[in-house]
Structures are given as structure tokens and as C-alpha cells.
Image (cartoon, rainbow, N blue to C red):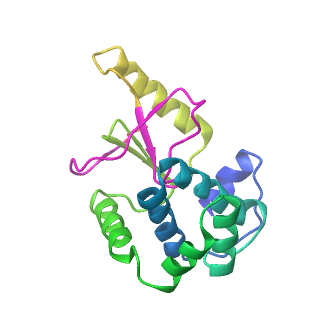
Amino acid sequence: IRLSLVGSEMCIETGRTRIYNTFDAHRLLHWAEVEVGAEAQHKLKWALLETYFTLGQNPSHHADLLLAVTRAGLDEKRAAVILQDDIYHAEVRAQEKFYTQQGISSVPSVIFNDQHLLQGGQPAAMFEQAIREIAEALNHGVKRLRVMCLYLQAPLPPQLPLVISPLKEIGAYQPLSL
């Protein structure tokens, strides 16, 4: 419901009410990063977003996932093997456990400077306020702003003026008090 409200504020109308299990999609994203590289993972993530948001396909259906793999230019046969077996199952569950232990309970979750957490679909003004507050800290000794979005699970487009870095194990995150 919250996504629909925020989406309507941003002129995004999905008309969808079903929630899908995207665990296999996350296994494919892990595979793309580990076996092919971060750029491949980035391409696959955008293809997976296209699968659901543009094409209206089921992001938990293996055939639709394999079509996304093909659109991303990755090896469909290797992806099919991953989906058929438990390959990367334990690794993705471990990531899931790590983020849950950090207090993350919804997506998207955006982590700023490995410290501050903004969870759930938020209006653009909320992100602007958060970025302004953290940017203010840049004037007080912080060298750069790092952002990790747990919805995308891949770096944001390079044209954005942000430095993207993977999360480190540093303890629980502090929710932003906006």
C-alpha cells in the first residue's frame, strides 16, 4: 500500500497487488556478481526490474527470470542450472540474515554512509531531506557520501553524483530521524 501511495506521488501506477517471492532472482543476481562481475549484475538487475515493472511478468517464474538473463546478455544455460539446483542458496540466505540482523525489515532500504537507514517506499522529499542532512555532515569532516540501496542490489547508474560502496559488517544501523 505504501509503495502505491509513494508511486502515485511520483506518477507511477503499477496496478499490481500481488507480492512475489524473488529469492531465485536474488540467487541469479548473486551468481551474476560472483561469476561474471558487478557490471553483469547491474544489467541483470535492470532486466529483472523491467520484467516486473515494464513487461508485467512474474519475477518468481523461472521462464521469466531466464528471459531477463537473456536480455541482460548473460548465459541462460548457466542461469537455468542455478535455478534448478540449490546453487547460491546458502550465500543468499546468509546475506538475507545479515541485513535482517542489521534492522532492515522492508525494501527498498537505503543505507547512507554505512550508518543511516531509510526504509520502505518514501516520498522524494524524504530522500532529499535525508541527503541534505547527511551532506551537511560532509562539511564537518565526512569525506564522501556512500549509498547502498537494498532494493536494487547493484550500483546505481554512474551518472549519479554518489559514491557507491558495498556494505560492511559494522553493527546495527541507525534509522534516520526525519
Give x and y (percent) for residue 141. Answer: 27, 16
Residue at the far top: name it: 139
The residue range painted magenta reads 146-175
Looking at the image, residue 52 sits to the left or right of residue 132; the answer is right
> Which quadrant would residue 143 be assigned to in this image?
top left
- The correct choice, above or below, for 97 with respect to 151 in the image is below
Quarter assignment of residue 44:
bottom right
Question: Is the residue 174 above or below the residue 138 in the image?
Answer: below
Report whether 20 appears left or right of 7. Answer: left
Residue pushed farthest left?
171
Q: Residue 172: give x, y in percent of width and height.
A: 24, 51
Q: Nearer the viewer, residue 86 or 117?
A: 86
x and y percentages locating residue 168 in the rendered image: 27, 47
Q: Quadrant of the N terminus?
A: bottom right
Indicate the position of residue 9 as horizontal and vertical percent values. Answer: 71, 46
In this rendering, position of residue 98 left or right of residue 161: left
Q: Residue at x 21, y 50 (%)?
A: 171
The main secondary structure of the magenta stretch is: loop
Residue 61: image quadrant is bottom right
**Residue nearest the observer in this picture, 59 or 4:** 59
Query: Horizontally, is 175 left or right of 61 in the view?
Result: left
Is residue 140 located in the magenta-colored stretch of the structure?
Answer: no
